[in-house]
Image: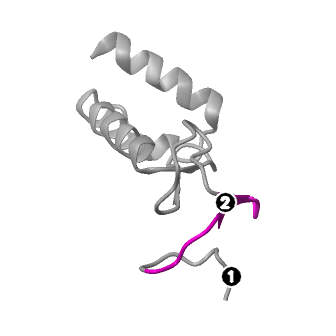
Amino acid sequence: MGNEKIGKGKKGPMKNTSGITTSKCERCGENLRIRITSWFTNETIGLKCMAEEDALKNTMSLLKMNPDEHKGCGREQYEKIKQIVSQVA
């Protein structure tokens, strides 16, 4: 089997959602230990960026902004949401 499998003992680069082999977070460049697809974009992200997205989604919920309405919205919209939330929070 290929390196795209996730799990204990699997090493090497992983394929992102576009089928491109990657071993780094597409957002911050962090080495990937597991592959996670961003909630907002189709980027392959690492644990650090996933935690940032989770915090953003929680803050959005507190501000009565439904995160589900923004799932898959793309990088440009994600950046706008981050900016809006940071100004309000």
Under mark 1, the amino acid is Gly
SS type, badge 1: loop
Under mark 2, the amino acid is Asn
SS type, badge 2: loop
Region of the chain picked out in magenta, as a range: 9-22
Badge 1 vs badge 2, beta-carbon distance below 8 Å: no
Instruction: Give the overall secondary structure of the magenta segment.
Output: loop
Viewer-nearest residue: 44 or 13: 13
> Is 7 positioned to the left or the right of 21 in the image?
left
Q: What crowding class fits label 2: few (fewer than 14 Cα within 10 Å), some (14-19), or many (20 or more)?
A: many
For the point 36% across and 32% down, the residue is 65
Query: Residues under labels 1 and 2: Cα distance?
Result: 13 Å
For the point 58% across and 78% down, the residue is 5
Viewer-nearest residue: 49 or 38: 49
Q: Which residue is mark 1?
A: 2
Name which quarter of the figure residue 37 lies in.
bottom right
Toward the bottom, the furthest residue is 1
- In the image, residue 30 lies in the stretch drawn in magenta: no
